[in-house]
Each structure stands twice: as C-alpha cells, then as structure tokens.
Amino acid sequence: MDLNDDDSHPVVNGNPAKPAQLEKLRSGINVLIIGAGARGNAYAHAVTDSTNALCFAVADPIHQKRDALGKKYIWRDRQPIAGQRFGHWREFLDYEILRRKKGTDGESVGPGVDGVFICTLDEMHAEIIIGLAPLNLHIMSEKPLATTLEDCLKIYRSLQPPESHSPSKIFSIGHVLHYSPHNMLLRKLLLEDCVIGEILSIEHTEPVGWWHFSHSYVRAKKIYQEKFLASANAGWPVHIVDPQIEDLFESKGMDWAAERLQMRLAEDYDNSTPQKEIERRPWFGRCVYESDNDVCDDQIVTMSWDDDPLPHSKDLSMTERLKGRGAKTAVFHMIGQTEKQCVRRGRVYGTKGEVEYDSKTIRVYDFATSEAQAYHPHQPGGGHGGGDEGLTRQFIQAIEAVELEAVPVEKAQRLHIGCTLDDVIRSHAMVFAAEEARREKKVIDWAAWWQAHVISP
C-alpha cells in the first residue's frame, strides 16, 4: 500500500482505495470537523493526506459547505452514515450523548469520534469548547482561542481535570506557524543548538500584505473578481464569499461563477437593517471605510524582561542560573500596507552571534569566526508554509500516542504539541495586555496585570 503525494485519495496497488480499504489504512482515530469553511477544509485535507486518522464527521449549518467537505473527505461517493453529518455542533452533542448512553445500556452503536477540530467564527469558540467539554474529547481549536480574556478563562476552567488528576485529553491551538519547517528549524537553532548563545533581543515584522489585509477587512470587487476569479482561481479567497462559486466555475464556467460572485458582492445593508442582521453575517462587498471597522493596521509592541534567575543553588553559578532567563527585549511590528504578503522576517541578537530570517532562509552570523551560514528549510507548500499539515500531524500523533500507545497525556502534549493549555492562556493574555496598552497608551507591568486580571480578577 502507498499514499499519493498529490491531492487524490490513498491508493492500493495503484488504484483508488475503496472505502473498506481506506479505513484499513487508518489508525482508528476518528475526528470531527466543526465549521466547513476554509480552515475546516484545510484541516480535513491535512488529516486525509498527512495522517493515519480518519476525517469521520462534519458539522456546519450551511448545507452546501457541509456536503462539499463531506463528499470530498468523509463519505465520498457513498451516502453518509449516522453520526457523520450534522447541521449544528449542538446536534452532534445531542447525538453523541445518546450514542454513549445506548452503548452503556448494552445496545449496538456506531463509531464515535476521538477528537475535534473547531473551525468556526472566533466568537463561537468559547460556547462550543465549553459545550463539548463534558464529552472529554481531544480538541484542536482554531486561533484565537476566544475574543475576550473572560472567555479564555471560562474555557480553561471547563477543561480542567478534577483536583489531583492529570489532564486526560490533548488540547491544541491553531498556531500553525509553530509547526512550519522554517520555524521549527529556527527554534531548534536558537533554543536547542544555541547558535548565538543567550538571546538578548528580538525584532520581528509581520507584513500582512496590502491586498491580503484588504481581503480580510475591505471586501471589494477588485480583490475577488479582478485579482482571483479573472485569473481562473475560484478557490480561496473567492469561495469564502460563496462556496457554490467554485462548483459553478467547474461545472458551468466563468460567466456563471462571475454572476454569482457579483450577486453576493452586491448585498449590502443600510440604516433600516436590524443590527442583529448586520452582525449575523459578513458583508463581502462593503468597503471597510463605510463600515464600523476599527481593526488596527499598524501596531508595534515592545516587551522587555528583567534578569530572572532561578532560586539560589550552591551547585550553580549565577551565569548557569541565568541561562535562558537573562534580560531580554522583543519588538513585534504588524503592518497591513506592504508589498510582501505574510513573508515574516526578523532578527535575533545573542551573546555569540546574530540570526536573520525571512520565511525562506535563516542566516546565522558567528561573532567569533566572523562567518555566516545560511539554512534553507524545506518549503513543502500548502497552507502557512507547511504549518497546516505540520500542526495536524502533531495533533493526530499526540492523540495516537495517548489512545493507542498509552503515553501519558502530559508527556504526549509536550512531545507532540509543544505547549499546554496553560501556555495558550498565557500567550492570549499577553495579547489582551498589549491591546490594553495600545488603547490606553500606557506601559503594563505583566506580573501586576496577571495578578489583577487572571489570578484575582
């Protein structure tokens, strides 16, 4: 048996795998996709193409999106079986509670799912994660975890194990760039190989890209029609406007797809439109300058750390105690109006050298030798420089380690995910603190802020 490298399905002896053969190729881990949009499809593709798990079920209220994902990655040319297609995540919740009750009562039941990818709108994450928490599933939530610190903390509390117990399930967040080959090598060079000694200062720039920022916040004909559909690209981001456009383009041609796109872009609201209707859905044809958009398009965040040695030890010198814990400064710059699209770049300065990176090449300069070495990480293609598939592989491997190899959750979490739910909460909290600093034009002391907002709110 072998697996294709292209966009097709697994093959057996050179022929497309039949459903029964396909399931034999899998590890027995079943996952549910909640949200059949662009991110849901990206993870469904990665699960199918890059792991031994089975994309088993999908939940989405828009039947075109739900069925399109299901036909491509789940039931394919078959009819969906019970437990594979849901119109809402609550429908899945009710089904799974009943399925488990029947199983406990000795009835024969169909298979369930081991893990879930939550790929809905950001503001829905908290409700879904908290609602699914009693099912004790492995969870991968798209970023951000939630849109408020309060909701992040509610999620954290809902997923905590009983007192004196260790976590029983894996939790991951959709920080896909953590798992791109470029960033994994960068991390290894800096933190494991210590190629520049102790890190002193970091400057990182996130150039969003003028049209990418426009796509995100300025919904316009120029972006969808002229830049993409006119170039025979009916996929992302065009299919975000309407998932049927891609099918129309393939089945009926450019004119039909363009007509559908124009119809959707013409949708607008005015003073008579109820506020709930305005907030309920995106308005892809409305310019950001005519909307209530207040998204920051140019932000610089400066973070500094003082020396933070470990407690005194007679066996360690101060230099050893300060390893990795010396004073540091980090500057993060996000800018929307750029030529480069998401080509992240930066420099890291250390006691023994300097690192420069640009998403494709990592250059290490050594002070002692006055020589530089360039690294060219593998560029696998796909979403986020291979990060989509990287994260998905790590999440599934963590589940397999727990469910199939009896590896303790905490060990699998660290080994495969590389961070914990605690780390996720802390990183999100820092973002909320940075936003508070920007809005209120003040410097925030992290320890005091954490105490006031998280420990004793």
Image (spheres, rainbow, N blue to C red):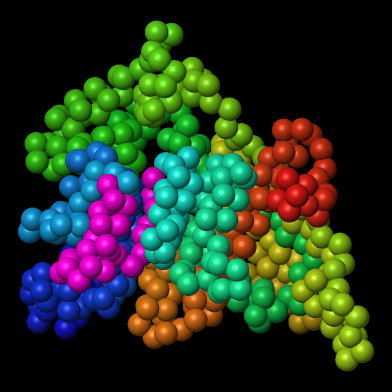
* Viewer-nearest residue: 158 or 261: 158
* Viewer-nearest residue: 215 or 162: 162
Q: Position of residue 243 (x, y in %)?
A: 24, 39
Q: Residue at x 62, y 45 (%)?
A: 149
The magenta segment is: 91-120
The quadrant in which the N terminus is found is bottom left
Question: Is 116 inside the magenta-drawn segment?
Answer: yes
Q: Residue at x 20, y 41 (%)?
A: 63
Q: Position of residue 268 (x, y in %)?
A: 35, 17
Q: Is residue 307 above or below residue 408?
A: above
Q: Residue at x 42, y 64 (%)?
A: 136
Q: Residue at x 79, y 34 (%)?
A: 441
Q: Quadrant of residue 391?
A: bottom left
* Viewer-nearest residue: 75 or 352: 75
Q: Quadrant of residue 188?
A: bottom right
Left or right of 68, for residue 394:
right
Q: Is residue 54 above or below residue 333?
A: below
Question: Is 239 inside the magenta-drawn segment?
Answer: no
